[in-house]
Amino acid sequence: MKIDTEYRSTAPELMDDFHMEGEILKDALDKIANINQLLGGNKVTLDGVKILISKEPKTALTRIIDVGCGNGAMLRMLADYAKSKHLNFELKGIDANQFTIDHAKSLSRKYANISYECKDVFDHLNEPEKCEIILCTLTLHHFKNDEIINLLQNFKLAANVGIVINDLQRSALAYRLFTALSFVFRLNDMSREDGLVSILRGFKKEDLRNYEQKLAIKTSFIKWKWAFRYLWIIKTK
């Protein structure tokens, strides 16, 4: 069967229901985080953060907000990295699902520099929360093109140093490989179905370039990374 990846899909994902809760969602959140870590996705975001802070004073406070934080795995990795390098990170996760936030809090109890808040970022576009860096890992593809423009415009105003976006490449090969991985990792039906939709809602490089033009972004770069994703760094400083 031919997989059409010419345009971004507008099909909904089950996980887009902000009122969803329960063991199926918890299992999906944890397995997504595990797969992201095993395939090197966490490192992609970390590499972006390293680039943005490379010219900042080592002792400076770096406030990082993770939009669509899931179970908080990315923030815990950043907290561990900051501790190992004696960096001063203040980390915050945002998600629109209260159950997801509660799960992330339970997994992050040992981290004093991580906090969480349940909120829909689109309800606060006129009230950007200031920070140094905004992260958006496997989250941007959940939104439509016009929503992405509005969201990134808000991010530009909020982030004093820059934005790190780590998201999926829209690719037929990625679609087929994820189908195989679904069985290897024994993903539940929701995770498998949402994962395939996510790939079809992902991006090609020209999509990201088009966003850059509409947002008049001056300094950024886009790099393809394994496994079938893009690292997009936007400098705001």
Image (cartoon, rainbow, N blue to C red):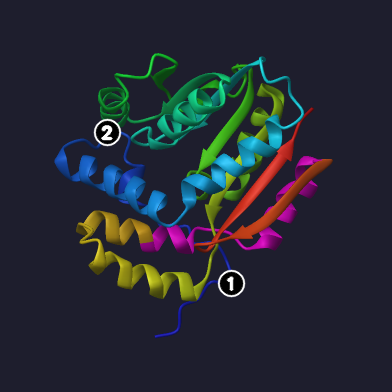
| Residue situated in front as seen by the camera: 36 or 96 | 36
Amino acid at the residue labelled 1: Glu
Residue at 44% over, 26% down = 93
> CA separation, marks 1 and 2?
32 Å
The quadrant holding residue 154 is: top right
Q: Any magenta on residue 206?
A: yes
Label 2: state its secondary structure: loop
User: Along the horizontal axis of the image, is 121 left or right of 149?
Assistant: left
Q: Secondary structure at mark 1?
A: loop
Check residue 215 for magenta coloring: yes
The residue indicated by pointer 1 is 6
- Residue visible at 25% across and 67% down in the picture: 184
Give the percent coordinates (x, y) of residue 174.
46, 70
Specify the amino acid type for callout 2: His
5, above or below 164, in the image = below
**Residue 3 or residue 45, whichever sits in front:** 45
Determine if residue 14 is in view: yes
Q: Of the numbered discs in the image, which one, if any, rests on residue 19?
A: 2
Q: Are marks 1 and 2 in contact (CB under 8 Å)?
A: no
Q: Residue furthest left?
A: 23
For residue 60, which quarter of the picture?
A: top right
Residue 143 in sight from this viewpoint = no
| 208 sits left or right of 72 in the view | right
Rendered location of residue 178, percent (x, y): 37, 67
Badge 2 crowding class, 10 Å Cα cut-off, few under 14, some 14 to 19, many 20 or more, is: few
The magenta region covers 196-217
